[in-house]
Image (tube, rainbow, N blue to C red):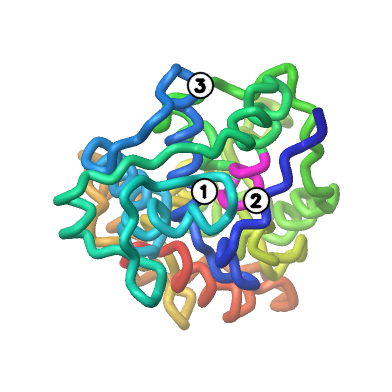
């Protein structure tokens, strides 16, 4: 069976993220795989709201929008629907009627093929989320790791991006300076995209940061960002015993920038991360 094409309306616009539909779809696909065929609004709303809050970056946690709007894409249907002129439905009405969402029969026939299902899941993750979040999203929605059946071909990346970024930052985290090695092998320092590759972020050094794996994941979760002076910002919801060590001691400090000045992060990429990902 060929890959399932998904050109969902208002899914994304340029580099602007719209994670609501992908997260609802991943949630429903996981439960459909487990045998659930209908998704009552009252059963779904809090779970999807939590997913959007956790993985949606700066997006508002409004599960009613994808629940209702996904029907316009030909793969989802909602019972007893009574939408307004914008094609939406008030939460109060959804709560009162407890509308049931479900996949269309045609879409169910497509995802019944194991390879097509595996490819679709990987496509949704690759097209809408940073790779650092994939495993966490799979765990959160209850999906297994990528299937050996999957033949989905990922978008071609620049193979020199990682090396060029690490060279520019002298193989150390631009926030904390971490650069631990075992003999000659650098451990836990990664080349992070500031503006994600799936949101039109280029594989260029000025769209990259060398970060330790902790700060890379914090950046992609939206737990941290950078202001117009490239100083560290911390989202209000971040907490934990090691907060001072990992974050507070670096707050308000500028990034450790490349010495050549040419490879410094471009302001428009940092601004994208603040607007689309940072949960400040």
Q: Which residues are magenta?
A: 123-130
Which label's residue is closer to the chain start, 2 or 3? 3
Residue 67 in the image: x percent, y percent? 39, 51
Tell me the quarter of the image containing the N terminus.
Answer: top right
Task: Report the residue marked by disc 2.
Answer: 127
Which of the two marks, 3 or 1, is nearer to us in this view? Answer: 3
Q: Residues within 10 Å of mark 1 (few under 14, many from 20)?
A: many
Of mark 3 and mark 1, the one earlier in the sequence is 1
Left or right: where 258 falls relative to 103: right
1 and 2 marks in contact (CB < 8 Å): yes
Q: Nearer the viewer, residue 175 or 32?
A: 32
Q: Residue at x 72, y 61 (%)?
A: 168
How far, Cα to Cα, is label 2 from label 3?
21 Å
In x, y percent, where is residue 266? 63, 77
Residue under circle 1? 22
Left or right relative to 244: residue 88: right
Q: Residue at x 37, y 60 (%)?
A: 65
Let me know if residue 126 is in the magenta part. Answer: yes
Above or below, comparing residue 43 to residue 206 in the picture: above
Q: Earlier in the sequence, mark 1 or mark 2?
A: 1
The tag on residue 33 is 3
In the rendering, which numbered label is found on residue 34? Answer: none
């Amino acid at each position: 069976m060929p890959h399932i094409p998904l050109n969902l309306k208002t899914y994304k616009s340029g580099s602007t993220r719209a994670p609501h539909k992908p997260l609802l779809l991943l949630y429903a696909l996981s439960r459909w795989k487990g045998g659930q065929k209908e998704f009552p609004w009252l059963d779904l709303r809090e779970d999807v709201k939590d997913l959007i809050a956790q993985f949606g970056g700066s997006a508002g946690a409004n599960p009613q929008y994808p629940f209702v709007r996904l029907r316009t894409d030909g793969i989802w249907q909602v019972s007893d629907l009574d939408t307004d002129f914008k094609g939406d439905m008030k939460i109060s009405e959804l709560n009162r009627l407890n509308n049931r969402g479900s996949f269309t029969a045609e879409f169910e026939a497509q995802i019944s093929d194991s390879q097509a299902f595996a490819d679709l899941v990987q496509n949704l993750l690759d097209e809408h989320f940073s790779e650092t979040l994939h495993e966490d999203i799979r765990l959160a929605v209850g999906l297994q790791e990528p299937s050996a059946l999957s033949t989905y071909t990922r978008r071609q990346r620049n193979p020199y991006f990682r090396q060029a970024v690490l060279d520019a930052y002298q193989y150390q985290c631009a926030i904390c300076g971490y650069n631990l090695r075992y003999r000659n092998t650098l451990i836990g320092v990664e080349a992070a995209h500031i503006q994600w590759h799936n949101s039109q972020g280029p594989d260029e050094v000025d769209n990259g940061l060398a970060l330790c794996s902790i700060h890379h994941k914090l950046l992609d979760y939206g737990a941290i960002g950078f202001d117009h002076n490239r100083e560290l910002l911390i989202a209000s919801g971040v907490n934990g015993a090691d907060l001072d060590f990992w974050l507070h001691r670096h707050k308000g400090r500028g990034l450790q920038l490349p010495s050549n000045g040419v490879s410094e992060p471009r302001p428009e990429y940092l601004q994208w991360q603040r607007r689309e990902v940072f949960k400040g």
